[in-house]
Image: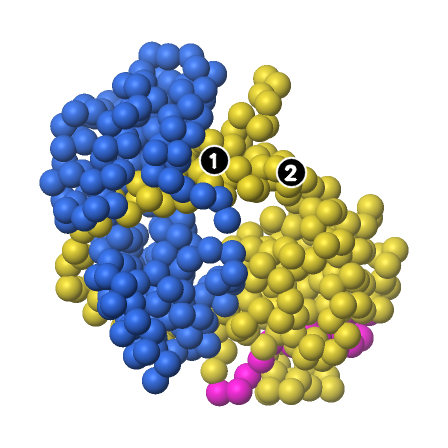
Chain colours: A blue, B yellow
Amino acid sequence: MEQGTAARRLEVVGDDTPVADASALLVRTARGDESAFAELFDCLSPAVFGLARRVIRDPARAEEVAQEVFLQVWQTAARFDPDRGSAKSWVLTLAHRRAVDAVRHDQAATNRDNAYDWAPDVDHDTVLETVTVKMEHEQVRRCLGSLTDLQRESIMMAYYNGHTYAEVATLLDANPATVKTRMRDGLVRLRDCLGVEAS
Amino acid sequence: MNTDLHDLLVPYALDALDPHERSKFESHLDQCDVCSVELNGFSLTAVRMAEATEEEPPSALRVAVLERVATTAQERPVVTAIAQHGALRRSMPRIAVAASVLVATAGLGGFLLERDRAEDLQTQTEQISTILTAEDSALLAAPATTGGELRIMHSPSHGDAVVMGSDLEPLTDGKIYQVWAMYGDEPQSAGLLPSSSSMVLATGVGDADAFAVTIEPAGGSQAPTTEPIVDTRS
């Protein structure tokens, strides 16, 4: 099987998430290959669940959303274009959007802002506790740590808590235009620190 | 408020826009080549933040997902991705509202062109684009008695219509949905919808008074053999 060859080759490179492999699995999933989909699930479910859990917090709800994400991946796999990015990016982008929509939808009913308990330092630690200590995670932590407080808070409240920039502005008692500027400056810095190159 | 749309790029990459601003930015993105390169870098940065939250899911998740997948149909491999089609892409901002209603759940990339298989796809795609952008095109949505609805973008001046099922009840036993253009009480086949959210281009229906849908055996029928589940007049 060509799949086996790919896996062996990746083993030699390292035990990090085999990105190329996930893309091949997603392409096979698009052709209705359920066993490829199961492998893809094993490969990406910690990232998808972890992200959903981080944004939504409630484990049961996060599980529900992770399930919806994978169902959507199954249904729309044919839209994935391996030439335009990795399967992991495709799935995580989709997962984040879905988690954010879920948390906002839920909060329309419960109004989370009354119970707002976001404390940057505590939250930051929680992320790191749940993180398997991997080089790339260390790097994300280090790079987030290199931002100014307002840059980091704006980005983390938006990305990890699902707030809109306008909500972030309200919560930080800052001007929305300022928050947008801080987000941009912070994300540029983070991008450069992580060595991300646009493809 | 006159927000500079480009300022929304970073919040967009972080999914930090409300739905209104999100769709506003997406229309802008379509016309902005510089944006997509910059957005790509920011999106990849966001993905790196996502990766830093890995957590082993409960084992029940795997079971549940695989169970549901076993009984869930996939979108058929896309014959043509209209979102990547030059002409339609350029006209997107004008038709953004109408098209987003038409394909609310499917997304433009997911259009399936069922009519006559892949025959003359280019022409079809152009016809669809023409209908969606026509000055007089109107969107019609009619509920199906069995669940879901039929959405029709009809341009009388061009004589064509784009007909799409939305969440119609999935059919089994080789049955399909057949669309009928109604001329008074006279039905004329306007195409087949093989799956619950497929799309068909109905040509030469400029004088149709209404549209109806019936469930027919695979391949379709010469005339309706069952009671309509959709009738745009009712």
In the picture of the structure, the residue carrying the numbered disc 2 is B32
Q: Quadrant of residue A54?
A: top left
| Residue B233, x across and y down, in percent | 70, 60
**Can you see residue B217?**
yes
Parent chain of label 1 = B
- Badge 2 crowding class, 10 Å Cα cut-off, few under 14, some 14 to 19, many 20 or more, is few
Q: Secondary structure at mark 1?
A: helix
Q: Quadrant of residue A77?
A: bottom left
Label of residue B12 in the image? 1
Q: Measure how far apart labels 1 and 2 are at the Cα level.
A: 14 Å
Q: Which one is in front, A9 or B145?
A: A9
The quadrant in which the N terminus of chain A is found is bottom left
Viewed as shown, does residue B40 lie left or right of A14? right
Q: Which one is in front, B97 or B227?
A: B97
Q: Is residue B160 magenta?
A: no
Number of the front mark, 1 or 2:
2
The dominant secondary structure in magenta is strand
Q: Quadrant of residue B48?
A: top left
Viewed as shown, does residue B194 lie left or right of B171? right
Give, as a three-letter code, the residue at label 2: Cys
Q: Is residue B179 magenta?
A: yes
| Residue B12, x across and y down, in percent | 47, 35
- Badge 1 crowding class, 10 Å Cα cut-off, few under 14, some 14 to 19, many 20 or more, is many
Give, as a three-letter code, the residue at label 1: Tyr
Question: Which range of residues does the magenta coloring cover?
Answer: B173-191
Q: Secondary structure at mark 2?
A: loop
